[in-house]
Amino acid sequence: MSGNYISQAAIFLVQLFFDIFILAFLLRYLLTKLRINSYNPLSEVIIRVTNPVLKPLRRMIPGYYGVDWSSIVALLLIQSLEIIITQLIIRGDVIAINALFILTMANLLKMILYIYMFTIIIQVIISWINPGAYNPIVTIMSQLTDPILRPVRRIASFGGGLDFSPLIVLVIIQLLMILIISPLMEIGFRLSY
């Protein structure tokens, strides 16, 4: 029975370690794509964490058409490695390549949705507690979510000073999790056995 607890602890540590790096690389990609100020303290930390991997990759894989392909390759490799190590701990063998690809894509999409979901929730809480306050992290959160919230605000402006766009976007994110991410994860796990 204690072996089960040890494997659960190992899986937790592996997922925590890899998810922190995946989060950093996703944020780096999003910050670069949205042209968010790289001199912001949070941006500087993300750049320092991701540069050891991205600098060598950028020499081999340049960006094309405004897409940072080295970040995408790094994300795919790190997420795949997390799945492989986790499956080795759970089952003792490596999963099929098609299952690995589907699970990698599903996990990365899920992480992107979680980034937006938690960022929007934190922004809403901050707007209740201390609206209009300046903070470098709040600025990045606004720059990150504004491209998603702005079109919803235009479509669903009810007036009266209330902004329902965060709620609408959170509902859409949940629907995407249910209708896209969950089926992809199920397909990936089915192919892995």
Image: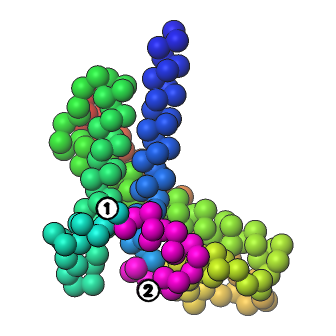
Q: Residue at x 60, y 86 (%)?
A: 153
Q: Nearer the viewer, mark 1 or mark 2?
A: 1
Q: Residue at x 27, y 78 (%)?
A: 67
Magenta-drawn segment: 32-51
Say few, some or many: other residues with alpha carbon within 10 Å of mark 1 (under 14 / 14 to 19 / 20 or more): few
Q: Residue at x 64, y 75 (%)?
A: 137
Say few, some or many: other residues with alpha carbon within 10 Å of mark 2 (under 14 / 14 to 19 / 20 or more): few
The tag earlier along the polypeptide, 1 or 2, is 2
Position in image of residue 164 (x %, y %): 68, 77
Q: Is residue 40 magenta?
A: yes
Q: Looking at the image, which residue sits at the far right?
A: 129
Q: Looking at the image, which residue sits at the far top?
A: 1
Residue annotated with mark 2: 35
Q: Is residue 81 magenta?
A: no
Position in image of residue 94 (x %, y %): 23, 31
Examine the image and state in which quarter residue 59 appears: bottom left
Mark 1 and 2 residues: CB-CB less than 8 Å, in contact? no
User: Does residue 128 appear left or right of residue 146 in this picture?
Assistant: right
Q: Is residue 112 above or below residue 101?
A: below
**Callout 2 amino acid:** Arg
Main SS, magenta region, reads helix
User: Does residue 153 appear left or right of residue 38 in this picture?
Assistant: right
User: Does residue 187 appear left or right of residue 166 in this picture?
Assistant: left
Q: Is residue 100 above or below residue 173?
A: above
Colouring style? rainbow
Q: Which mark is residue 53?
A: 1
Element marked by disc 1: helix
Q: Is residue 91 above or below residue 114?
A: above
User: Does residue 73 appear left or right of residue 163 in this picture?
Assistant: left
Residue 27 visible within the image: no
